Amino acid sequence: MSTKIRLDNLNIHFGANHAVKDVSMEVAENSVTAIIGPSGCGKSTVLRSINRMHDMTPSARVTGCIMLDDTDIYSRSVDPVAIRRRVGMVFQKPNPFPAMSIHDNVIAGYKLNGVLKKGDADEIVESSLKRVALWDEVKDRLKRSAMELSGGQQQRLCIARTIAVKPEVILMDEPASALDPISTLKIEELIEELKERYTIIIVTHNMQQAARVSDVTAFFYLGEMIEMGETRKIFTNPEKKQTEDYITGRFG
Amino acid sequence: MDKTATRKNGDGIFRALTMLFAFSILIILLIMAGEMVWESLPSLRKFGWGFITGSDWDAVQGSFAALPYLYGSIVSSILAILLATPLSVGTALFITELAPHKVGVVTASLVELLAAIPSVIYGLWGILVMTPWLQTTIEPFLIKHLGFLPFFQGAPYGVSMLAAVFILMIMIIPIITSITKEVLLAVPQSQKEAAFALGATRWEMIRMAVIPYGRSGILGAVILGLGRAIGETMAVTMVIGNTPQISLSLLSPAYTMPSVIANEFAEATSKLHTASLMEIGLILLVVTLVINFMARLLLWSVTRRWKGGTP
């Protein structure tokens, strides 16, 4: 498999706080990479740097290099808006737009490309909702507010909204941590299916979840990447003692 | 033992005292409203509904009707709102979303400073600076280029409905801006990030996430501004020309409810004249109360949604 994303000596500062230290990693195309580690280890910070979400935080400073295929995403000539269309993101708390209908939520990002015919819109809404297995649950109430859905449905709606833009990479920041076990299971099944088309990086607190959904796991601690490898190996036979301590529950 | 009892007593007294203060405000309002109804009874009895549908105001003949004042108040306020809203929302968006933090803070405090200027100073500036400028520059321009419209016909007097609209616009910008700013600041970060993550530009993010979320709050801010505009007395009185007429042309002088009260109360000699002014006051009170109530209702519906957590 070819490399989709490469992080090279990534450092992220917030003012005087050095949040991410010299992180280098490679993410293969059409794979699921899980980032685990205790709270405050910098895992979400790394994730958010991959679609330039730190641009909106004035105190944040990102140095080093992140390559998306052959594009250095922090290069001056690169438009962050174009990067975010290639690298979508799903957040911890479901965040559909409350003033929009289910239909309009799905199409919200796609519509930014320009005007589109009604038929095209309906087609994209249907295919995106089918891909997140939400279509059967909402097809009769597409015009209703997205806020009427349950938390798990809202999160799948947010994933549908993300894939409607046709990204190459999907970043997931603890996408199931605010959901009940059944909704969590559905999201996990969805991740399994989505990796056929997208490269997925998921940050999670839940080690069982990382073990279930990911091909590769990276363990972060205090802003550094301690170890990265095949998920099975990380969870059965880690090389570093810190990784072992964390996955066996000795701290974190 | 003794000490605990005293402290408990103190608590009770404190409670009673604050309750007294709080209720006294309500009671003052009720007494005022009651008094106004009572004082305007002669006019209410004599003219009935004709008071707000007629337009004859003649102290010598003893016939009074308030439509020109109602018209002047409502038209000047609504036009001022129409002009002030885009300016204020734009300013608030600049402060909260676009400006670097320090520039935003300075801009916000400058705008709020506008609210601290006494209205008589706005009026003075209006008379000495703005009206001559309207008379020599703006109004001739409007007559020349838009004179075919009924809104810009007649001679350029300077003092006019247009002058009142401009003064009111400047005076209500601070209130709409600062409330809109609070509304925009309350838009959750998660909503903005959702839009950015879909590849929205800053402007698209504002249109997609910020404005829809803040819509009813902004509407509340606009309505509060309307309430302020309708009640404004001094500055408007100084520039509107104080002529009780209903004219489509914005270049004609007009008159508002607060202005006629301020101008005529001292020399109202007949009981009916006083009662008529009281009734105008009553109408004004009702209009502003209704507007404020609507604004509170809208703002309340927004804050309640926010308290429900991030949607």
Image: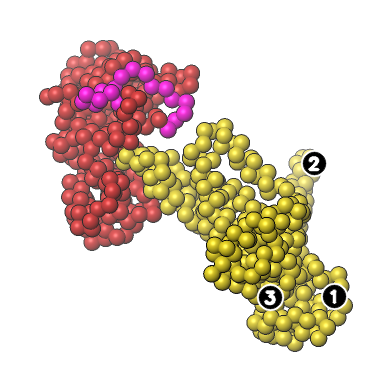
Which is more N-terminal, label 1 or label 2?
Answer: 2
Which is more N-terminal, label 3 or label 2?
Answer: 2
Q: Which residue is mark 1?
A: B268
Compared to A156, does A140 lie above or below? below
Q: Please state which amino acid type lies under the numbered disc 1.
A: Ala
Q: Residues within 10 Å of mark 1 (few under 14, many from 20)?
A: some
Where disc 1 sits, the SS reads loop
Quarter of the rendering occupied by the N terminus of chain B: top right
Q: Is residue A35 found left or right of B253 in the rendered image?
A: left
Tell me the CA gap for discs 2 and 1. Answer: 62 Å
Q: Nearer the viewer, mark 2 or mark 3?
A: 3
Q: Which mark is residue B2?
A: 2
Where disc 2 sits, the SS reads helix
Region in magenta:
A56-74
Q: Chain of mark 3?
A: B
Q: Nearer the viewer, mark 1 or mark 3?
A: 3
